[in-house]
Amino acid sequence: MKAKLDQIRCQVQEQIKSCDTTEKLNEIRVSILGKKGQLTDLLKSMKDIAPEERPKVGQMVNEARAEIERTLEEQKRKLERALREAKMKAEVIDVTLPAKKTEMGHRHPNTIALEEVERIFIGMGYEVVEGPEVEKDYYNFEALNIPADHPAKDEQDTFYITGDILLRTQTSGVQVHEMEKGKLPIRMIAPGRVFRSDEVDATHSPSFHQIEGLVIDKDITFADLKGTLAEFARELFGESTKVKFRPHHFPFTEPSAEMDVTCFKCGGAGCRFCKGSGWIEILGCGMVHPHVLEMSNIDPEVYVGFAFGVGLERIALLKYEIDDMRLLYENDIRFLKQF
Ligand code: DAH
């Protein structure tokens, strides 16, 4: 009996230690300790043993049983630990791996230039407003004193949607929208997209951007216009920038002028950038025409104003020394990344 028991113990210990799944471990448990298991069978044969031997044999069987259960339990824990470790290993994140590169977006030179212009005028107490891109003829032309037979109204220059509705050719119409609100004084800039039926080349595009400016108050003079725009030019292009006003004509301002700034590249000596003149034209401006005020129900005997219009692309091209406007619209990331 003892020999049989020792044989079972040895054999089972081997089986358990070489077992590699918890399912198999369970099968072993059943085959030894179960109802029809080897050890149970052995207990059943106790009846054939002499009664005085029984307690001793019983104790031996119980010890063997306890030993087998311990081994089973140990092996079970070992298997579970191995399983946990394998799982952790599979889930491990290697923080030293190089990250996947994602291309970051970038602000467009137009946006950077616009934010700069807005910062300057907001600093002078101006409000930033917007107007519609699809506009009535009245706002784009008529209320700005542009007569019906003006060449700008030609279909060759303007995209018409109907006879009366068009894509605005200038942001100047926003002046009229603001004046119509009837809230005075006005100090506004209005950035936005404009449209003209132009062929694409290095300096033209059928769609570009302007920034309109309008100030209406009592006692405004041409000196206010000059001082404001000279300060704008200095902030935008540098402290040493000088400005020059040349007489010009715009239907909605009287008198009208174009403003030049000293070339920031050569400082006014003349270079390739300013085509040797030392000056670069940068905006149109003037005192708001009394008739324009009148049409928007503002009394020109009481109120005066000045206005100006700047091309946003022109500023971006100048500031970043870009010599082809088309680069601004291609959105090539290699180009945009440089600003
Ligand atoms: N709207 C003009 C243009 O598109 C630019 C301009 C000139 C706007 C003079 C103004 C101004 O407000 O006073 O060419």
Image: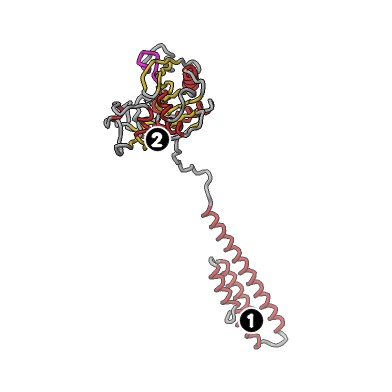
List the residue tagged with mark 1. 1
Say which residue appears at 53% left-offset and 54% top-offset: 89
Stretch of the chain drawn in magenta: 272-281
In magenta stretch: residue 86 = no
Q: In this rendering, does residue 125 appear at all?
A: yes
Could you tell me residue 47's position as x and y percent? 65, 88
List the residue tagged with mark 2. 333
Q: In this rendering, does residue 234 appear at all?
A: no
Mark 1, Cα crowd under 10 Å, few <14 / some 14-19 / many 20+, is: few
- Determine whether the residue tagged by mark 1 lies in a helix, strand or loop: loop
In magenta stretch: residue 275 = yes
Could you tell me residue 142's position as x and y percent? 35, 30
Are the residues at dot 2 and dot 1 in contact (C-beta closer than 8 Å)? no
Q: CA distance from mark 2 to mark 1?
A: 88 Å
Tell me: is circle 1 under 8 Å from ligand 1. no
Say which residue appears at 72% left-offset and 82% top-offset: 55
Tell how many labels: 2
Could you tell me residue 282's position as x and y percent? 40, 21
Three-letter amino acid code of the residue under disc 2? Ile
The one of 58 and 22 positioned closer to us in this rendering: 22
From the image, which quarter does the C terminus lie in?
top left
Could you tell me residue 129's position as x and y percent? 47, 33
Tell me: is circle 2 under 8 Å from ligand 1. no
Q: Would you identify the image quadrant in which residue 248 lies?
A: top left
Three-letter amino acid code of the residue under disc 1? Met
Dot 2 or dot 1: first in sequence order is 1
The one of 152 and 181 positioned closer to us in this rendering: 181
Q: Would you identify the image quadrant in which residue 137 lies?
A: top left
Q: Would you identify the image quadrant in which residue 168 lies?
A: top left
The one of 315 and 24 positioned closer to us in this rendering: 315
